[in-house]
Amino acid sequence: MNNKTIKYFSAVVLLFTACATVPQEPVGNITDLSEHVTENGQRFSLAYMPNAGRVSVHVIWPNDFAHTSGLPAASTLGVELMSSGGAGDRTAKKIQQDITALGSSASLRASPDHIYGSFSSAPETLDQTVDIINDVLREPLLDDFRFDALRDAKRKRVESQLSERSSILWSAARRTLLGESTFTDYWNNNPVESTITSISIDNIKRWHRETFTTQEVTVAVAGAIDAATAAEVVDQLLDGLPVSKSADKPVLRRLNTGQTILIHDKSAPATLIAVLGLLPASRVGGEIADVVAVSAYGKGKDSRLLQATADELPESEKLDASLANFSRTVRVFGVNANVSHKSAPKAYRIIEDTYRKFKPGNLDDQEVLRAVVPFVNSLQSSQTNPDLLAYGLGQLLLDDLPQELLLTVSQDSISLKAEEVNQRITDMYPDWDDMVKVILTRDPKLIDADCVVRSLEEISDC
């Protein structure tokens, strides 16, 4: 799967799932988990950790403008411009020096649906840290010259990536699934002329003005801070941001499932295979069962997929399954393969056969246990980190899920039974024929495809 997609989703899964432990002891020394409203009317949730020694604040804004404007790359360029420039009366270098001197950290990140702002500080330097962050949010230096340089650098990076066959494969898979949409453009940045080059500094200024407001903001706080002080911090952080009217929400058209695309590349050194299957949005719940199910199917040496290939394919030819988010409503699991042309027909058959046998929901207790144990072990090392807990709490708030799940995810994982995972697979996982399959190969007759193309652009005609 595309590295950008994998890293994005892996971070989300790690941060969300690394947020709890068994309930015999307070999770991360959380002594209270509660919801509050500031004096200015901003709602926030607080995981109170009196012994943490740090405070972490995560603030999340809808990234609607980037899509409703038809310029999805504006958000990634805008965040890069804000993060690398000055603000208020400070230069970019001075901001970094001051944040470091305070022993604090801060970041701003774009996703397809939201902009994530986060910072961490010791309680005694919190006030000074918030002042700096507020400057960056309220009055960043958005100058033409630096923007032109950043845009040109991004264009060159994207053009280089688009020449890589693995990028072509997954760009084709996303385009097939998502169709012609701004979400496709967000991930693929193709064509470069319309998705990147056409963006102006005026677009970025408007994006900033309409995104960083006090409306529809999600706030999660974790650490050594009481509710009253946290409320003051939240109001201080958002002070001076405009109150904006809600923008129209970006809408995805009906997804294109059940298509098989073959990309004929005469000079391809190997055959690449991508398979995508839709899963329910995270707000529906069931993510733990998905992690376990996909791991049992195709992650690790004990998975069904790798067991099936052990005696069939050379050791150097690997097949792998993983989870990804293309948006908060479009979750998928994917299978990725890079195999020799000689092995390609066999590899594709193995992927299909193992999935068809997996779909009826017949994992046994040992398969589930092998998937659950490393998952639960990954929770333990980060359970006292306020930053991870604040992130996990923010994800629950975005999905309108009970914030108490922050405290029970480890116990919920330990208690998961094969019967529950199998029911999830049976009820929620697509049939093989409803999945998107894309194969890049030099053999145009490798599989019976719905459409054979020679470039990413030709997919629009399929």
Image (tube, grey):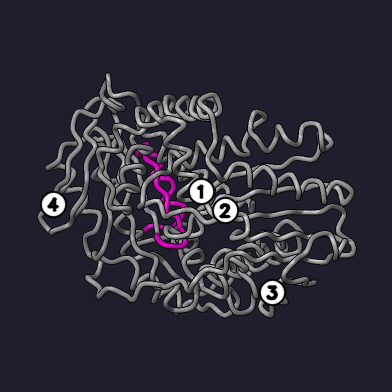
In the picture of the structure, the residue carrying the numbered disc 3 is: 459
Instruction: Let me know if residue 109 is in the magenta part.
Output: yes
Q: Give the range drawn in magenta.
A: 90-114
In the picture of the structure, the residue carrying the numbered disc 4 is: 37
Q: Residue 50: percent from the left, percent from the top?
A: 21, 28
First in sequence: mark 4 vs mark 3: 4
Task: Specify the amino acid type for callout 1.
Answer: Phe
Q: Are marks 4 and 3 in contact (CB under 8 Å)?
A: no
Residue 107 appears in the figure: yes
The CA distance from mark 2 to mark 4 is 35 Å
Badge 4 density bin: few <14, some 14–19, many ≥20, Cα 10 Å: some
First in sequence: mark 3 vs mark 2: 2
Location of residue 444 (image quadrant): bottom right
Badge 1 density bin: few <14, some 14–19, many ≥20, Cα 10 Å: some
Front position in the image: 276 or 66: 276
Task: Name the mark on residue 5.
Answer: 2
Badge 2 density bin: few <14, some 14–19, many ≥20, Cα 10 Å: some
Q: Residue 297: percent from the left, percent from the top?
A: 60, 38
